[in-house]
Amino acid sequence: MEPAVNVAANVARGAVWMISLRLLERSIGFVSTLILARLLMPEDFGLVAMAMTVFAFVELAGQFGFDLALIRDRKAERVHYDSAWSLQVASGVVMCAALALLAAPMSHYFAEPRLVPVLLVLAGVALAQSFENIGTVNFRKEFAFAKDFQLMLGKKLVAFVVTIALAVATQSYWALLGGIVASRLSGLALSYLMSSYRPRFDFRECRALLRFSRWIVLRSLVDYLIERGPDLIIGRMLNVSTLGFYRVSREIATLPTTELIFPVMRAVFPGYAAVAADRQRLADAFLQVQSFIVYLALPVGIGLVLLAEPVVGLLLGAKWADVVPLVQILGVYGAITVFQATNLSIFNVLGRPQWGAGLKALEALLLLPAVYWAVANQHGISGAAWAIVLAQLAVIPLGMALISRLLQIGFRRRLAVSWRPLVGTLAMGAALLALRHLLGAPQGALACGVQLASGIAVGASVYLISTFGLWRISGTPNGAESRIAHVVRSRLLPT
């Protein structure tokens, strides 16, 4: 078994690489959004959201989670990798055919004729990307996160250049579609340039892979219903512009939390897999990751809720002002996801993916009827957003109970790693509300920029002073603060 100190070091190193990647990606994304929001119209975003809703549904045929199966199996051989790749290509053929067949019916469903050529282009993309090199899984399995960083950032840079160039040239939804195509195709090319592995067709281990992955597929289906189900309801019952407002609002609102949580979890799963045989070490690792995620993501998520007005005004401009309340509601959803972030990785690494699928299924069963009811009863897009928040709140206690059963972690141990960030976030929120009262509503891009910069400075200062003060008063227990303090000391006072 790999020594604990090495696992911790590898996970920490991977988390740094993945968070750095996400920060770079989202810096690029912010610039892209800033430009596109001024060149394109809300209906352009809404049309592409419709297409991606259909694409995401069909893409479930390829969401087997073979990467997780290969990472989890420390003894996986070439036949396992080739079988995973073969199934990946087979699913790509199915996806391509399905998208082509669905193009006309979905165009009729949304009453949007422009959807047909968009879906046909995405059908070709689905087939091409299915040939991506399975060997890149080893970047994570072997803790070579620098290569994973380069692969994902390369795709993002290519997509950015293509999207902006097409937006300037066409000022239409084809710019957004072109960016998607460029990202997927560049990922295909880079996967073979960066990995020496050359897959070949081999189906001998498909049955074994599918036994693990069937629950991953089910969970992916449920994830789709949670992520894209509201789009189907909003796009059908309201209109394309409203759907565009909703998708942009959701992306901005969940940006701070998902873009901090996702890279950490991408790095953490291989570490969890390395210590899964020792339940105590796994429980300790879970609590360390939980404390780190809550410490970083919760204040950022709540901060966005309180600073939504200057964020939207600065990034998107006046024509997007109506999305501010929506960003605030969905920002609450993004913030509370920190309490569920690490659960699914634990379920998967312990061979219980059905638990994660069941938890997500419950959320979908609560979410979709609530969204439909909100829209049908004239509560509009804001009512739909509150339905999303409430569905997430309802399943959080169950997720905590399942983790407690698996890892023997009681409420007291969870609270010990979370109470200081919770109190610090409350203090930060009070400070930001006072600042908002002092400065008033921002008028114009300059005022938005000033208020946003002031809010970030004040919020971060109050949060750090509060949490580190409580940490010192508590006797400097092991937690996110101790790790941050160690990193700061090692940088300022190198040995």
Image: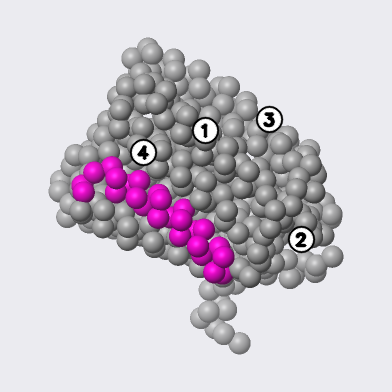
Q: Position of residue 286 (x, y in %)?
A: 70, 52
Of the 4 image quadrants, the one containing the N terminus is bottom right
Label 1 sits on residue: 98
Q: How far is the residue under mark 1 from the one under mark 2?
A: 30 Å
Distance Cα–Cα, label 3 vs label 1: 27 Å
- Give the alpha-carbon distance from disc 4 to disc 3, as whole Å: 34 Å
- Residues in magenta, as a range: 170-194
- Left or right of 216 in this view: 2: right
3D distance between C-alphas at marks 4 and 1: 14 Å
Whether the magenta-drawn stretch holds residue 177 is answered as: yes
Q: Which mark is residue 78?
A: 2
Near-viewer residue (435 or 10) = 10
Q: Earlier in the sequence, mark 4 or mark 1?
A: 1
N-term-proximal mark, 3 vs 2: 2
Which residue lies under the disc numbered 4? Answer: 118
Amino acid type indicated by mark 2: Arg
Instruction: Give x and y (percent) for residue 4.
Output: 77, 66
Which dot, 3 or 1, sits closer to the camera?
A: 1
User: Residue 144: where, in percent of width, then height?
Assistant: 63, 69
Assign a secondary structure to mark 1. Answer: helix
Amino acid type for the residue under numbered disc 4: Val
Q: Residue at x 35, y 18 (%)?
A: 237
Which callout, 4 or 3, points to the residue nearer the camera? 4
Residue 426 in sight in this render: no
Vertically, is 418 above or below 23? above
